Image: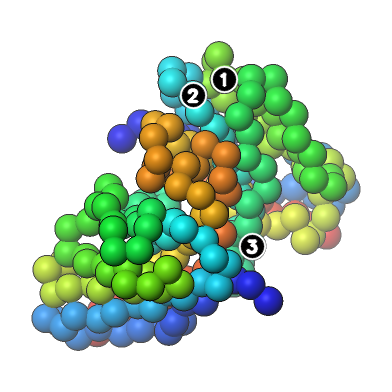
Amino acid sequence: DGGITQSPKYLFRKEGQNVTLSCEQNLNHDAMYWYRQDPGQGLRLIYYSQIVNDFQKGDIAEGYSVSREKKESFPLTVTSAQKNPTAFYLCASSRGQSLSGEKLFFGSGTQLSVL
Amino acid sequence: ILNVEQSPQSLHVQEGDSTNFTCSFPSSNFYALHWYRWETAKSPEALFVMTLNGDEKKKGRISATLNTKEGYSYLYIKGSQPEDSATYLCAFPPIKAAGNKLTFGGGTRVLVKP
């Protein structure tokens, strides 16, 4: 079955530590996205990528980094510079680059907590 | 960031009753409106992508309407069932250019009571 796989489901970070969240898709989609959800808030865009080896900052990119070396993979690193990393992280993809008509497909998310 | 507002934040519905809720968005430079359903412990799932003023879409007992001139969309659930319990999200791309970003509303959490 085609879809988006996020791992791990739960992740714990120690102070000063970088952690990486994995996102893999086998939908052959061009575009991929990382969203963050905090309680009581809407999903907020962290980074997105339209094509391999290219990515752009979203609305809350500070303290995060990404790479897009392969079409299928878009890992997110939460760096020690992100002072409030506890949140639920969702990865998504879309077939095309314009979201005027293309819907998002989502993974099942990673809950990141700080120890 | 252009705001997308959803109301109410939550609602309880008796099984069999119908309900509706609202997504408001900036009416200028409209391109599309997305609706997603997010059930607990599952991935958000697209319901509709709407692009034309006056558009109406239907998926089973769920339907949506769109008014781009006044900047709102309604989602209707007819004859609610417990499996309709979920958070319903709307989202709006602020600009049409490639590599766009969706701005999400805070969601309407629906709980259908048997």
Kindly identify the amino acid type of the residue bearing the numbered disc 2: Phe
Kindly identify the amino acid type of the residue bearing the numbered disc 3: Glu
Percent across and percent down for residue B47 are 68, 48
**Residue in the picture at 83% in, 59% down:** B114
Same chain for mark 3 and mark 2? The answer is: yes
Position of A102 relative to A18 (above/below)? above
Inspect this view and state whether residue A108 appears: no
> Helix, strand, or loop for circle 3?
loop
Same chain for mark 1 and mark 2? The answer is: yes
Position of B3 relative to A86 (above/below)? above
On screen, residue A65 versus residue A91, left or right, reads: left
Percent across and percent down for residue A77 are 25, 74
The residue that disc 2 covers is B30
Tell me the number on the disc at residue B39: 3
Disc 3 to disc 2, C-alpha distance = 28 Å
**Residue in the picture at 43% in, 84% down:** A8
> Helix, strand, or loop for circle 2?
loop
Percent across and percent down for residue A79 are 17, 73
On screen, residue A23 versus residue B55, left or right, reads: left
Eye-nearest disc, 3 or 2: 2
Disc 1 to disc 2, C-alpha distance = 7 Å
On screen, residue A39 versus residue A76, left or right, reads: right
- Label 1 marks a residue whose chain is B
> Helix, strand, or loop for circle 1?
loop
